[in-house]
Image (spheres, grey):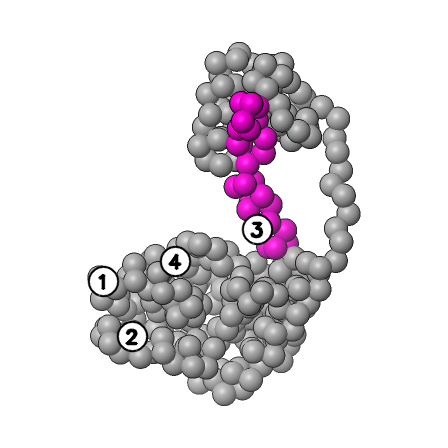
């Protein structure tokens, strides 16, 4: 099986991808012997790679011992498609929020343990702030407890909150919350309003609001937010604008997911 031009298929990564491509290319169960012929590397190597991929649920073995694509690949494909759909749908709404507020508008996708910022909109006067700021993406970092998007996720996910319960809040600025009971009260406010707010708890001089973006089944897939200078950012106005934009993104994402997708292009091996 030929790889992509310029790719070295002799690397570990190249061989793993070659095994996955070979299984996908058969369109049905494939034996170890067939897989070895398709990949063109020694059978013990193919057996070892395939066994590791089975353990990671990227391949599975049928009752006859032949290989099929595994459920983890389906999950990765779904996430990739959803991420692309969310970016496509949310971009104009993020740009509209920037046009209406003049502040930094953004949207991110949330996973099991990470946050992926998909796009931002901001003016030239905010570019230094974006470059200077740290946009946390690890849900188990201290910044999760201080950022608006982190608090929105903690209010949504009891298991994530429970994983932090043994550690007191770790403030990032002098305005940060240090009391666990007070922090829980702040999360209750997020649940009541569906809006997470932080004032100068991540960076002095800046405030942020965030709200959730949901899929058609109501599951949380992302967050929409606005970050701006404290004193200029109107919390009351943002609390009106953000839910309306998030609902529009959820509606448009649902329509896009319901639309039939073109068949994937098949490449000869």
Q: Which residues are magenta?
A: 59-84
Residue at screen point 24% across, 76% down: 181
Q: CA distance from mark 2 to mark 1?
A: 12 Å
Kindly identify which numbered label has been placed on residue 216: none
Identify the residue under disc 3. 79
Q: Earlier in the sequence, mark 4 or mark 3?
A: 3
Is the residue marked by circle 3 packed among few (<14), some (14-19), or many (20+) residues within 10 Å? Answer: some
Identify the residue under disc 4. 139
Q: Percent position (x, y) of residue 121?
A: 59, 67
Q: Percent position (x, y) of residue 51?
A: 46, 25
Identify the residue under disc 1. 167
Q: CA distance from mark 2 to mark 4?
A: 16 Å
Q: Residue furthest top?
A: 42
Identify the residue under disc 2. 183
Q: Percent position (x, y) of residue 60?
A: 53, 32
Residue at screen point 55% across, 84% down: 240
Q: Earlier in the sequence, mark 4 or mark 1?
A: 4
């Amino acid at each position: 099986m030929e790889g992509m031009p310029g790719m070295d298929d002799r690397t570990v990564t190249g061989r793993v991808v070659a095994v996955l491509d070979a299984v996908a290319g058969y369109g049905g169960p494939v034996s170890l012997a067939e897989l070895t012929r398709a990949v063109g590397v020694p059978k013990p190597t193919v057996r070892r790679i395939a066994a590791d991929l089975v353990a990671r649920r990227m391949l599975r073995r049928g009752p006859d011992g032949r290989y099929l694509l595994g459920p983890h690949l389906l999950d990765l494909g779904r996430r990739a498609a959803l991420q692309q759909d969310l970016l496509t749908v949310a971009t104009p709404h993020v740009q509209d929020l920037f046009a209406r507020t003049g502040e930094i508008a953004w949207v991110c996708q949330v996973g099991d343990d990470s946050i992926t910022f998909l796009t931002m909109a901001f003016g030239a006067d905010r570019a230094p702030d974006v470059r200077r700021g740290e946009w946390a993406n690890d849900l188990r970092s201290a910044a999760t407890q201080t950022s608006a998007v982190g608090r929105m996720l903690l209010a949504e996910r009891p298991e994530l909150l429970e994983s932090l319960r043994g550690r007191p809040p770790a403030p990032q600025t002098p305005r940060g919350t240090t009391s666990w009971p007070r922090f829980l009260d702040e999360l209750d406010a997020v649940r009541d309003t569906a809006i997470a707010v932080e004032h100068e708890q991540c960076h002095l001089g800046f405030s942020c609001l965030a709200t959730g973006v949901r899929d058609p089944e109501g599951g949380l897939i992302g967050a929409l937010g606005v970050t701006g200078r404290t004193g200029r950012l109107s919390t009351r106005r943002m609390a009106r604008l953000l839910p309306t934009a998030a609902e529009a993104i959820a509606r448009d994402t649902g329509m896009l997911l319901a639309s039939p997708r073109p068949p994937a292009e098949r490449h000869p091996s």
